[in-house]
Image (tube, coloured by chain):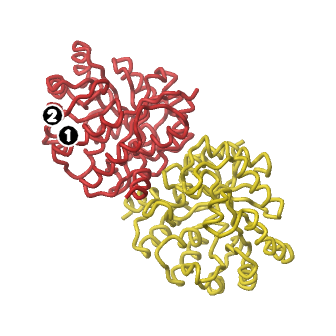
Chain colours: A yellow, B red
């Protein structure tokens, strides 16, 4: 059941930098270009949202105008509403993403509406995307736990994922937003979702707050999941545990995939250099253990 | 095949502190006592070696004389030679451990003799231990790779493990000394060893230098391994990649075992407090992600 080819979706420039100290536009552009040079073929590069709400994601249009677009690389962006979608379209993004939650409380506290309202709100995005032949990715947060509700039933995750898929999302990325999941739980959740949505349309987006992300990914690879989100240098903290780890580090994922003999197209040595460079620019410790180990070895 | 009950062997006071900045004897005693208060039932507390060679492990006899021995807790120590064993016996240790390598080059560079010579050297320890009814644990290092030789054949690991087991070690702990292993490789190595030594006599001792330790443990649990070595707060660095991560953190292991519903007897909240305390004393960042996440939550 384990797939031979893995699609990595690099979310460092968006989900990562959004939860790090403010970066300059120049550093963000440098990062996206450097990531594309490692062989990564899908980079979530920015978010088209009001800079009033998310100042760290400001100037997404300038970013898209400045990066060197490589052939074969998908440069995507989060577009929570139609205004964001139109700006993203004008900026020439390859793909967009929308965001829902499997937790009613999280949806209310994070985006001030119910789950179903959040999905209704981005229906115009899906309609416009269809019209412009732009693929839409759907995120589901809190799939293995919610900071407000605690446990979330796998059936609930499956329900939300199915709504997103049937609404037109070509892929549904299942987020362990607070990183509390463990392998059996992750596998049970993915199995429940896969009963409603084809497994080829599922992605894992696991946070490493409790050090479980890679073990959880390994468990879900056995079920046939072939798309995994991760963030170079583990960029991105955890807003629910300040100072704790956030996203799974792409370097650690790539290292494991190499060991498992699964192809992914990414050059680990180049990736480690990119992770160390952005960590240095941000003045933070590299959140990837592979990044730390290989940096020390070569320095 | 997955066992329901896991025996954790806490190696922080020995394998951990040996690779950290020098601790005071008082801090080492405090750590051992605090660990015993978490429900851990096997603590490798010290090493009976010459302080000329390993100054951080000096005064093992004083340590054993000062700790509060809890009923039901095994307090063990590394005893590389008969002199160390006699001192350990006099100090009243419950159990001792000896150390070999699966790599000829590592054995030569680390202890200046061949693998077979190293085993011959601790035969007097095994004989004396038998005489005094003291159980002996055998470590095998470099089971998933060697800093000098690179890959190590699983058959080679199995051979060394079998020699240790047949020489009288009741348990053989399989070390991924440089932390380069990945899940399939770890499972293949354990399978090869389990063909020669009963799986109930095997332990995993995986380092997290490349972030793979927990995923590797998860893979080997499926094979029936039920004893796992780990180090509170991830104490212990990696001498082959200065500044990089060393031992698997006990907190992260316990968190996963809790999620998998496997019993182990350890109170995670107490363990997190112990890990944060020793990290603070050492002036280092807590190497456990669970430790970081739960500390931030509660502080």
Q: Is residue B45 left or right of residue A55?
A: left
Query: Can I make out residue B248 in this image?
Result: no
Query: Can I make out residue A256 in this image?
Result: yes
Q: Is residue A9 left or right of residue B291?
A: right
Query: Which labelled disc corresponds to residue B29?
Result: 1
- Residues at circles 1 and 2 in contact by the CB criterion of under 8 Å: yes
Q: Residue at x 61, y 50 (%)?
A: A144
Which residue occupies the foreground of this view, A71 or B105? A71
Say which quadrant the N terminus of chain A sits in.
Answer: top right
On the image, the x and y values in percent for residue B172 come to: 39, 27
- The chain identifier of the residue carrying mark 2 reads B
Which residue occupies the foreground of this view, B287 or A154? A154
On the image, the x and y values in percent for residue A161 come to: 75, 56
- Residue B79, above or below B269: above
Q: Residue at x 76, y 72 (%)?
A: A121
The residue at which mark 2 appears reads as B66
Which residue occupies the foreground of this view, A10 or B122? A10
Q: Is residue A225 left or right of residue B106?
A: right
Provide the secondary structure element on which disc 2 rests: helix
Say which quadrant the C terminus of chain A sits in.
Answer: bottom left
Disc with the residue nearer the chain's start (1 vs 2): 1
């Amino acid at each position: 059941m384990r797939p031979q080819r893995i699609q990595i979706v690099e979310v460092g420039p968006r989900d990562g930098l959004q939860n790090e100290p403010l970066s300059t536009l120049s550093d963000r552009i440098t990062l996206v270009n450097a990531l594309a040079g490692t062989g990564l073929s899908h980079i979530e590069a920015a978010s088209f949202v009001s800079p009033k709400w998310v100042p760290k994601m400001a100037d997404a249009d300038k970013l898209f105008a400045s990066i060197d677009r490589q052939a074969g690389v998908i440069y995507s962006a989060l577009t929570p509403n139609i205004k964001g979608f139109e700006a993203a379209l004008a900026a020439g993004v390859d793909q967009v993403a929308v965001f829902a939650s499997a937790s009613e409380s999280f949806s209310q506290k994070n985006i001030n509406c119910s789950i179903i309202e959040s999905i209704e709100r981005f229906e115009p995005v899906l309609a416009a995307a269809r019209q412009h032949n732009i693929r839409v990715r759907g995120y589901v947060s809190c799939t293995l736990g919610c900071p407000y509700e605690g446990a979330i039933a796998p059936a609930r995750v499956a329900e939300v994922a199915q709504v997103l898929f049937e609404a037109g999302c070509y892929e549904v990325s299942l987020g362990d937003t607070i990183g509390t999941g463990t392998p059996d739980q992750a596998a049970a959740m993915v199995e429940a979702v896969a009963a409603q949505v084809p497994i080829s349309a599922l992605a894992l987006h696991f946070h490493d707050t409790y050090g479980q992300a890679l073990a959880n990914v390994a468990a879900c690879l056995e079920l046939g999941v072939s798309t995994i989100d991760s963030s170079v240098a583990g960029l991105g903290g955890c807003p629910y545990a300040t100072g704790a780890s956030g996203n799974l580090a792409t370097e650690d994922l790539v290292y494991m995939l190499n060991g498992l003999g699964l192809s992914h197209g990414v050059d680990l040595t180049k990736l480690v250099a990119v992770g160390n460079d952005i960590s240095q620019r941000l003045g933070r410790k590299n959140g990837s253990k592979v990044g730390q180990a290989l940096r020390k070895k070569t320095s």
